[in-house]
Image (cartoon, grey):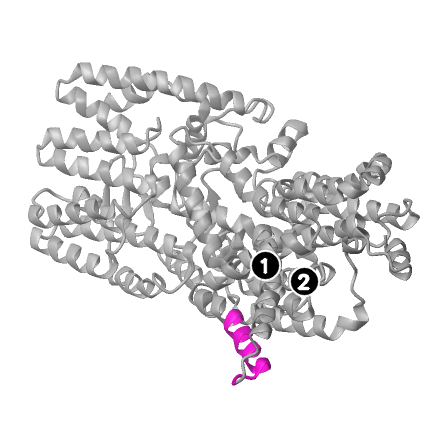
Amino acid sequence: MTNLKTIARSTGIKSKIDKLPERFVYETPNFNNYKFILLTLFLIIFSFYLLTSPRLVALEDDGEFLLSSYFLGISHPSGYPLYTIIAHFLMSFPWGSVAFKGHAISGLFGALTCLMVFWVALGLRLSTSGSVFAALMLATSKAFWSQSIITEVYTLNSLLFFIILHQVLILGFGKNVSSSDSLTDKKRVMALAFVYGLSLANHWPLMGMVTPGLLILLWPRWRLILKSISLALPISMLGLVPPYIWMVLRSQQNPLVSFSGPINGWDEFWFVFLRKHFFFQENHISANIWDIVTYGQGLAWELFIQFSPLGLILAVWGFKIAWVKLPRQINIGLATMFLSTPLIILLKLNVAYSHIGAHVISVTLLLSYAICALWIGMGVIALFEWLQQKKYATIKLKPLKMAVAIILICLPIALNYEKNFRQNYRWVDDYANFVFSLIEKDAIFFVSGDLHLFGLGYLHFIEGIRPDITLIPSDGLVFSTRLFKPDKLTRKERVKIIQNYIKNTDRAIYFIPSDLELVGKGYSSTNLGIIYRLKKDNKTGNTINIDEKLLDYLIKTKKSLNHTDFHTQEYVRYVVSNIIRSFVGVSSTISPEHQKNIVTRSLDMFGESLDVKTAALAGILDGRKGEDREMVEKILADCRQQLKENKDRTIISTFYLTQSNIYYRWNMVDKAISSMKMSLSVKPDVFNPALKQLFIMLNKEGRFEEASLLREDYIKRSKDQWDMLRSMRSGSLNNGGKSDIENIDINKRLMLDNN
């Protein structure tokens, strides 16, 4: 094309050829020209992450990945073997605590990802300043920053993605794209296939979701790809398969940390690789279209606040510029990668809305945010060009650009600083030490859930806190101290094993509140506010033992509620709710006036959220009758007002259930039944305790026809929905495995409670 234009111009012929644009070439920058900028960028971003990262263990998956990396174990499905191997190697260097090293590893991958964003931006013809902006805006964005300062797999996934994207753009739009397939290009395809395989060994679902966009970018070289595919596929397997072979072999050695225990046979391998363990967490029979709409609104809001509203405006401006200046295929490819992850997640979503679920989904969109950062870089250049055209007579342009640059970079830092500056974070450490202080010497502590498995597990197994205690996972997950292998037994069989173990040991036994139902008959318990101590006294029920130490902890943890990350806020509310419920329950044994005082003081300190208020109401139900009805009515009214603002269906359903039990206690039967039906309508799940309680309530009040209709409705509902889920989950159970899916007989579930 260039030769034709030259000839046309030399002959004086003005042709339409003159108006045709040059073919866009994705140019690999010269490293020597940018090595100082690269080094400076890396030092700034990596130092920023080190400065703001926690020195102690945090929440999310931080404790789990610290444990699996340190002990060379197996994390939750799909196992993430590549990350485990790399992180274990980097942790062997003698610098800092294990927690800080884990956080620094994520920061390292995050900083390198930002350098790759800079590099790709240069290749897309952005100026140096625009490319720097793209890198810095990603580095300081809300979610990417948060995942770069804790032990997580997302920043490694982002790094591998941008390495792949860079190579794909070279193949699709490099200088030699129109020439015959060179040996260099064939080698590049093989290298690309290998790195792609490695990325699947880290986080295959996220890489799989952006693959359509990568294929669009490769379309100009489809002939080369087809010719190379017979060799490229086996080479990609060389990146993918060895880490997973290692994972299976390592699981056979029964390491201290192995999420599901030894992996035996193909069925169990696919169960882990395809993440079937999370089937029920990711498929709620009560989910509906409004949950998808609510999650979609949440994702849109997350995009709005990632880079600040000003950053989003620049991203839209940059997208518009890119659509004009870049080839259509590059724009479509980038747009596809930006949209594919959120759209696939929303289309696949079958989960009742919860606050914690919304947060988990938001951090899976790091690649979408990274693409958005490229557009911001283009938008910044457009902004500077606009300022240049204005030619302000009274304002020097360079200082103005510098001021705009500082504002753009500092704005997301200022907006996200409170949540992501976590240098002094210690809530998990304080909580774990407090729980351990409640447990007597040589005791057995049954634990489950992220906070207790990973938070307490990190301090116990890595930091060596309370080595005399034995931590046993009540659900059989994570630790080799398990009593059974999960996903192999029904819940009834698992409970029986735990109860036999308790029966045959002389050691003191402790449980967390959510696991107390596993204990069985013949035991009473002592409520210590946060945990329970089992008593082998052939009695039932529980007593409450609250001391000043618990009150001191409650006041101390108040400081963590408003000035820290989302996960900590959720767990603080969980812990506070348990303590307040215990305080309120025991206060009724003194006098109604004392209970009123405790409730008032507790809600003054922590009562902003619906779940904490509901816990106080549950504590009133736990105590003796004679509560101050005027106070309770006021709390109920406040809670009903908050229902308009809360979208978490579990919290709302729990409130209606608690309200129903209060009304029933006051002999307000119609209101009680109506409120219980509301709980069931909010979360029409066969495992919602409101189903059983409503059935019992209706029978007690002689409303047998309603009870029968309720039963028939849920027999049909459960059959239809569980048949659908069973077909979706076909082949996902381990060989010979069992599941709670077998325990959905509504008649049995209802009658067991009724007897």
Position in image of residue 332 (x %, y %): 65, 45
Residue type highlighted by circle 2: Leu
Is residue 685 positioned above or below 454 on the image?
Answer: above
Position in image of residue 287 (x %, y %): 40, 32
Confirm whether residue 13 shows in the render: yes
Mark linked to residue 385: none
Q: Is residue 261 magenta?
A: no
Q: 40 left or right of 232? A: left
Q: 260 left or right of 601? A: right
Q: Which quadrant of the rendered structure holds the C terminus? A: top left
Position in image of residue 541 (x %, y %): 23, 38
Judged by its main secondary structure, the magenta piece is helix
Q: Report how far apart the C-alphas of labels 1 and 2 lie in the structure.
A: 23 Å
Residue extent of the magenta highlight: 394-409
SS of the residue at dot 1? Answer: helix
SS of the residue at dot 2? Answer: helix
Q: Which residue is mark 1?
A: 318
Position in image of residue 387 (x %, y %): 56, 73
For image coordinates 39% across by 42% down, the residue present is 294
Quarter of the image holding residue 550? bottom left
Q: Earlier in the sequence, mark 1 or mark 2?
A: 2
Mark 2 surroundings within 10 Å by alpha-carbon count, few (fewer than 14), some (14 through 19), many (20 or more): many
Which of the pair 367/49 is nearer the observer?
367
Front of the two marks 1 and 2: 1
Mark linked to residue 112: 2
For image coordinates 18% across by 36% down, the residue present is 661
Residue type highlighted by circle 1: Gly
Confirm whether residue 107 shows in the render: no
Is residue 633 positioned above or below 2 on the image?
Answer: above
Mark 1 surroundings within 10 Å by alpha-carbon count, few (fewer than 14), some (14 through 19), many (20 or more): many
Q: 652 left or right of 183? A: left
